[in-house]
Amino acid sequence: MSVKTENITIEDLIEKVSSYDDNLEDIKLIRNAYDYAYKKHFSQKRITGDEYITHPLNVAWILTDVNADGKAIAAALLHDTIEDSDSTFEEIKNLFGEDVAKIVDGVTKINRLNFTTDSEQMAANQRKILVGLSSDVRVLIVKLADRLHNMRTLYVLSEAKQKRKAKETLEILTPVAHRLGMYKLKSELEDLSLRYLNPDAYYEVVEKLNLKKTERDAAVNKMLEEVSNLLTEHNIIHEIKGRSKSIYSIYNKMNKGKKFEDIYDILALRVFVNTEQECYLALGLIHSKYKPVPKRFKDYIAMPKTNLYQSLHTTVFGIDGQLFEIQIRTYEMDKIAEYGIASHWSYKENKSVNSKDVMEQKLEIFRSIIELNEESKTPEEFIDNVKNDLLFNDSIYVYTPKGDVIELPKGATCVDFAYRVHSEVGDKMVGAIVNDSIVPFDYTLKTGDIIKVNTSKLSKGPNKDWLNFVVTSQARNKIKAFYTRREKNENLERGMAIFEKALRRKKMSLQETLDNYLNIILDSLKLKDLDELYIAIGQGKYTISAVMKLIGKKEEKTNKILNKTSEQKKAIIKNDILVEGMNEIKVSLSGCCKPIPGDNIIGYITKGSGITVHRSSCKNIIDLDERLINVKWNENLSKRFPTDLLIYTSPDDNLLDIITKASSNNIAIDSVYTITKNDFKIYAITILVENTEKLDKFCKELNNLKFIQKVERQMN
């Protein structure tokens, strides 16, 4: 897309706005906003050396691409005045109205935040804050345009700052643009982010695109002409454009293991017609001439996406057998598809889409943004948290000793601050110093305070009395979670002690008892695992005598299993294992060594719980001679099995690279647990993999990553 980013004047801007908005009041508002911003930014320079006013002009210009209304354009021109001059909210409100002032204030609040993306959860929380501060959706739109212009001039910053800004853009802002349906803006942000985060990959894709550009253009033009003639023959008024796939989108597919040559939707057309009925007529004509690819048809007209996107998608075998992705939509659908909620109609009181009023549209978008936050258990909880913490209370801005800005609701205390910094800081808090003075835990903070939280490794955790004065749901939830967790651990330890004591009285081995009877006990009591059993005993939910009775009832089944080995010779399939001489017997894979196809395995006949299959090298059966039975894997398996790995990494590791390697090898990561050491990290991960051959290939690829020191398969 060709975008004017230099030497834009206010006359250029007004001419562009006038092309879609003939309201003279809007034009007057925009001109007055420019005059005000010009005075406030007079003599200020950008790092590029340009006059500062060029930045708000470019941000406003970007918004004209989405036909933004007069108030949004005015707010874009004013968006840095509160932050970078002596302007105040009240002054802007008096001069330009409450709506414009609120948009400027919202962008200012967002800009004061020190965004970080150290983890996926942190990025999710930052997106939540971003959305929470945006009571008017235009705040988000102005912020996204602001970031886009800054990304276009990112070359002036140091490499470290370029990468930090690009990472923040990719992980926090582009998901918000996606939820708003602003695909054009999102696509450019993604491409620019990739250019600075991974320039080698960016230019590799660019080079591949340029290499065969002539042939691709010729194929697209020929296909475009054929489809256009087909529609014209049937009297369908239309317009067709070749559609280019973004560099970042191609990089993503290649990063997941696809070859450039196999990315079929690089060749693409977009067909525009006047009515919904003509969309389906055009689709039928195209399918009658070009064979569609099975399972590649999507009807987003009948079933729109949550951000109101509508279009028909199909992939067909086009000229010379090449695959073409074709999108068919009306002009109105295209406006929404390209610009999402930012489209001009979304602010106008007298406009509506799909019979929904403007407020309902905004609410629908905000409901979809809720999906960005996975910490809240329900959408309702998320909404309540945002309302309580961010939207309907006045905010205060306080600082860490390092100068990072932390936003809190009015009335927040030192404990609220500690938990906002990190849950571990809150749990281990033993005191607080505000502006170099010691203060009580319930001290009410105010804007500008600098807070240092004192912690101690000897701390036994938060005080329950803190629940009486904390105001943020985050602090309240973390304190409650600590006590729930501690009570759970106490019950677990108590239950374990009771269970082991009962076994010692009966002179029974703990490991043998668990191997033989654990599944029986869990099934009978409807419990998930051993920890739940211990907790249930510790709580007194089940008495130890009731548990021991379950063990006694199943003793007699063992001999029946042993007798059948000599009577039956047919091997049958049970739980993916071929059992020699067994006909009707329960078979399960051991949780201690987690065998997968390709491992040498042996069966162990338990008391009352069928056969447990172990790796032959498992320490729990290696010294046993009795009750062992030959088993082997069924050769026709196609499912994936769990196994555990320990991955030792250097401190500058990238978990995303590990996840990407797993995905490209068709390996699912079931769980990840991080153990942090001074000089290295250990990731204990459970993966789902088909066999040892694929596991070995995955481990080999992991070892090729620079930050990985060692990969081990775990055996408990």
Image (spheres, rainbow, N blue to C red):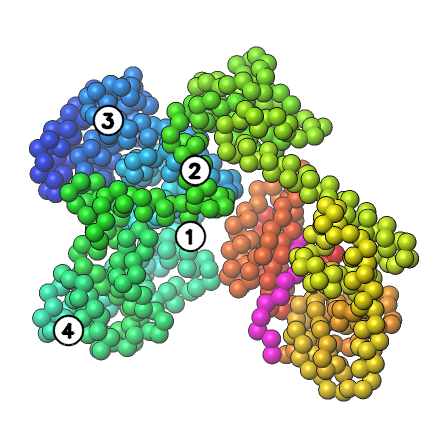
Q: Horizontal and vertical percent for residue 689? A: 60, 65
Q: Earlier in the sequence, mark 1 or mark 4?
A: 1
Label 3 is placed on what type of residue?
Answer: Glu
Where disc 4 sits, the SS reads: helix
Do the residues under discs 2 and 1 have CB atoms within 8 angstroms?
A: no
- The residue indicated by pointer 3 is 98
Q: Earlier in the sequence, mark 3 or mark 2?
A: 3
In three-dimensional space, the C-alpha distance between marks 4 and 2, rounded to whole angstroms, equals 54 Å
Q: Earlier in the sequence, mark 2 or mark 1?
A: 1
Q: In the figure, 87 relative to 144: above or below?
A: above
Where disc 2 sits, the SS reads: helix
The stretch in magenta equals 636-646
Q: Residue furthest top?
A: 437
Do the residues under discs 1 and 4 have CB atoms within 8 angstroms?
A: no
- The residue indicated by pointer 2 is 384
In three-dimensional space, the C-alpha distance between marks 1 and 4, rounded to whole angstroms, equals 39 Å
Q: Nearer the viewer, residue 63 or 665?
A: 63
Residue pictured at 16% horizontal, 45% vertical:
351
Q: In the figure, 598 relative to 679: above or below?
A: below
Q: From the viewer's perspective, tell me whether residue 366 is left or right of residue 233.
A: right
Residue pictured at 40% horizontal, 34% vertical:
387
Q: Nearer the viewer, mark 2 or mark 1?
A: 2
Q: Is residue 343 visible?
A: no
Do the residues under discs 3 and 2 have CB atoms within 8 angstroms?
A: no
Q: Nearer the viewer, residue 10 or 497?
A: 497
Where disc 1 sits, the SS reads: helix
Q: Horizontal and vertical percent for residue 565? A: 80, 82
- The residue indicated by pointer 4 is 230
Do the residues under discs 4 and 2 have CB atoms within 8 angstroms?
A: no
Label 4 is placed on what type of residue?
Answer: Leu
